Image (tube, rainbow, N blue to C red):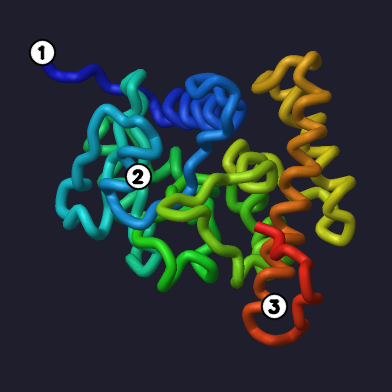
């Protein structure tokens, strides 16, 4: 029996909820497993504890893959150097039987969850999402410009609070005050129903995790490029 078709809107909503559930560690004993980039298909499959990984029809596996999670949900990962993101996104949706018309997709960007500027020459695959165009611009205008030297966590990159907000379609509300913007984002996660009000305290801790990760990336880059010298005995923040 052929797989049943899914509507565009229902798939997007399912994808958002799956992203949040993996960010919160629903399937990994509370550990954040929101993977936004990987060295290669094998590393992605292992890290995600996936059921399988296949090429997108019409593309080599090194260019674009479909990751199938244990619960059957499917996601798109593509080479950050690949052009015509919208074409590969549409091929992916067609392959997984999502009905998507030109009218459905108007107003959405096919976007790298992990910024292309950081991903190129570092990882082979980046998670691709369809994100509301206006929301996408709020993240790209300032926050993502600061991430060119952001490094992966070994063979994969785990997304912190900022990328999950973007993946959920929540705009960067104040790029000049990241702390307040991330906290406002938590309010939106709860109001949209992805998280329960009782999760607020846990999510506030994720604000700190996100900022510490960004600080560590900045410090490591500054040391690695010789902009600052590491004091004797001081550990490098990882």
User: Is residue 7 in view from this perspective?
Assistant: yes
Q: Which residue lies under the disc numbered 2?
A: 44
Q: Residue at x 31, y 39 (%)?
A: 45
Q: Residues within 10 Å of mark 1 (few under 14, many from 20)?
A: few
Point out the frontmost of discs 3 and 2. 3
| Residue in front for this viewpoint, 235 or 78 | 235
Q: Where is residue 203 in the image (x, y as percent from the top left)?
A: 76, 30
Q: What element carries label 2?
A: helix
Residue 223's tag is: 3
Closer to the chain start, of discs 1 and 3, is 1
Q: Which residue is drawn at 64% across and 84% down?
A: 225
| Residue in front for this viewpoint, 46 or 129 | 46
Q: Where is residue 197 in the image (x, y as percent from the top left)?
A: 80, 16
Quadrant containing the C terminus in the rendered view: bottom right
Residue 1's tag is: 1
Q: Where is residue 231 in the image (x, y as percent from the top left)?
A: 80, 76
Q: How crowded is mark 2: few (under 14 residues within 10 Å), some or many (20 or more)?
A: many
Q: Residue at x 69, y 78 (%)?
A: 223
């Amino acid at each position: 029996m052929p797989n049943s078709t899914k509507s565009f809107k229902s798939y997007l909503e399912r994808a958002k909820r799956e992203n949040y559930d993996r960010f919160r560690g629903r399937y990994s004993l509370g550990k954040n497993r929101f993977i936004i980039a990987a060295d290669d298909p094998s590393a992605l499959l292992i890290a995600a504890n996936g059921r399988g990984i296949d090429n997108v029809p019409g593309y080599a596996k090194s260019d674009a893959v479909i990751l199938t999670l244990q619960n059957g949900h499917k996601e798109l990962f593509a080479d950050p150097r690949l052009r015509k993101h919208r074409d590969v996104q549409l091929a992916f949706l067609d392959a997984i039987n999502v009905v998507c018309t030109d009218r459905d997709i108007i107003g959405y960007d096919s976007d790298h969850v992990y910024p292309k500027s950081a991903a190129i020459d570092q990882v082979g695959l980046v998670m691709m999402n369809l994100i509301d165009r206006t929301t996408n611009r709020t993240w790209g205008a300032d926050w993502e410009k600061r991430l060119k030297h952001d490094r992966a966590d070994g063979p994969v990159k785990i997304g912190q609070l900022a990328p999950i907000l973007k993946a959920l379609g929540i705009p960067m509300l104040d790029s000049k005050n990241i702390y307040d913007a991330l906290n406002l984002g938590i309010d939106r996660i709860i109001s949209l129903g992805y998280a329960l009000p009782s999760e607020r305290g846990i999510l506030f801790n994720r604000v700190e995790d996100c900022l510490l990760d960004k600080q560590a990336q900045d410090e490591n880059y500054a040391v690695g490029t010789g902009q600052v010298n590491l004091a004797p005995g001081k550990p490098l923040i990882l």
